[in-house]
Image: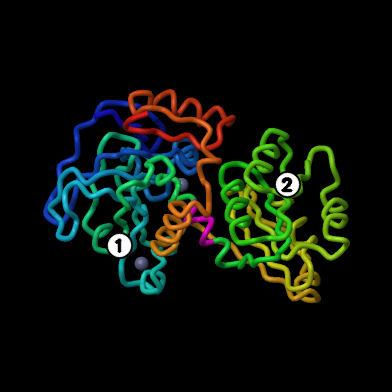
């Protein structure tokens, strides 16, 4: 079968690999839809700490499909399922809380187990027993279902803030993840959604996704514009969805009393420090949080939000490719000009 592979230490290759064999307690999934994530781009540029030198892995952790073969109880062949990609050790504090995405010993499809940028995926026994495999309604469109994983990360972030109806919320960075944030903030019932980016095309996409105010970081003074929009009061919540330390500082300064800030994007490994105004936090009773990934519960909520139409994630998809055009799909994602690229068994 065709697969997009990465070997730790350097090489990305689209190549032919054998269809995986399954053991007792496992299943074989035929991939119907899978999307490319910023994490895939990061891995093929810089590797992953979970991989050992020379280890080869099939990339891809955002996916849905049909169970083709099963040796697992309660997972009949022919089931249509969505898959949450992370599972944990099962016994640490994070796992006991149901948040395997914070387990120090987590495993994931497309990270340290073969993932979904291929025709088939071997579904592991712990992924099945920990509840990562979620049955789907019969009429679910495949391509939007693959976006449940990135939306689950956004759900986790907005749950931790939280975002409330009536809030004025700023989203820094209008790439695919920033747009998913805007869609979810809109579904929650925010009063104003302020999209901030330096790229005009991305700002236009933010408007499509439901942003009510656009600020060009290139042409405008962000602080002045936020003051103007909020009549001097400031933001109820801000989300940073771009890996830029300066926007964290700026967003904190723009919060209203009791305002909440989520560092959703990680910062560059060699430049993670941010100078925060401690007095702003102290005198305004601010909340600063950060999140990574989503848990199985977030994933299930993301599926419901997508399938009910509450969060129209199709707005984030810019390109669709058949699995036979896997190389072209990656070229498009690597060009930096795409939003979400989705690979489908049948286009
Ligand atoms: Zn992802
Ligand atoms: Zn654990």
Q: Residue at x 71, y 64 (%)?
A: 167
**Nearer to us in this view, 107 or 220:** 220
Q: Is residue 277 left or right of residue 77?
A: right
Residue at the spot of label 1? 131
> Looking at the picture, how far across and down is residue 52, in whole percent?
34, 45
Ligand 2 location (quadrant): bottom left
Q: Is residue 319 above or below residue 296?
A: above
Numbered badge on residue 196? 2
> Looking at the picture, how far across and down is residue 228, in whole percent?
88, 55
Dividing the picture into quadrants, the one containing residue 295 is bottom left
Q: Residues within 10 Å of mark 1 (few under 14, many from 20)?
A: some
Q: Considering the numbered disc 2 on the image, is that residue within a helix, a strand or a loop?
A: strand
Q: Is residue 24 left or right of residue 142?
A: left
Q: Considering the numbered disc 1 on the image, is that residue within a helix, a strand or a loop?
A: loop
> Looking at the picture, how far across and down is residue 9, in whole percent?
40, 36
Quarter of the picture containing the N terminus is: top left
Q: Residues within 10 Å of mark 2 (few under 14, many from 20)?
A: many
Q: Is residue 62 above or below residue 301?
A: above
Q: Which residues are magenta?
A: 151-156
Please say whether residue 154 is one of the residues in the magenta stretch.
yes
């Amino acid at each position: 079968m065709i697969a997009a592979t990465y070997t730790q230490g350097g090489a990305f290759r689209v190549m032919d690999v054998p269809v995986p064999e399954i053991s007792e307690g496992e299943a074989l999934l035929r991939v119907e839809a899978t999307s490319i994530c910023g994490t895939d781009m990061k891995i093929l540029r810089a590797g992953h700490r979970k991989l050992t030198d020379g280890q080869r892995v099939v990339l891809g952790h955002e996916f849905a499909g049909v169970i083709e073969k099963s040796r697992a109880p309660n997972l009949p062949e022919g089931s249509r399922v969505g898959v949450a990609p992370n599972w944990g050790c099962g016994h640490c504090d994070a796992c006991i809380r149901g948040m395997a995405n914070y387990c120090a010993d987590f495993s994931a499809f497309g990270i340290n187990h073969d993932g979904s940028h291929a025709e088939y995926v071997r579904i592991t026994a712990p992924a099945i027993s920990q509840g990562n495999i979620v049955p789907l309604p019969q009429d679910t469109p495949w391509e939007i279902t693959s976006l449940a994983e990135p939306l689950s990360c956004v759900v986790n972030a907005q749950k931790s803030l939280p975002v409330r109806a009536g809030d004025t919320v700023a989203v820094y960075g209008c790439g695919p993840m920033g747009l998913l944030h805007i869609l979810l903030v809109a579904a929650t019932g925010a009063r104003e959604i302020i999209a901030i980016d330096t790229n005009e095309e991305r700002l236009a996409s933010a408007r499509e996704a439901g942003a009510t105010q656009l600020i060009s970081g290139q042409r405008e003074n962000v602080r002045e514009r936020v003051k103007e929009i909020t009549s001097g009061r400031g933001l109820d919540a801000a989300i940073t969805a771009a890996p830029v330390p300066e926007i964290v500082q700026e967003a904190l300064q723009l919060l209203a009393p009791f305002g909440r800030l989520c560092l959703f994007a990680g910062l560059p490994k060699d430049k993670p420090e941010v100078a925060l105004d401690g007095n702003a936090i102290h005198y305004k009773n601010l909340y600063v949080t950060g999140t990574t990934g989503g848990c199985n519960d977030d994933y299930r909520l993301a599926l419901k939000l997508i399938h009910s139409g509450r969060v129209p994630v199709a707005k984030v998809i810019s390109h669709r490719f058949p699995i036979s055009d896997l190389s072209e799909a990656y070229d498009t994602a690597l060009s930096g000009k795409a939003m979400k690229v989705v690979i489908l068994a049948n286009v």
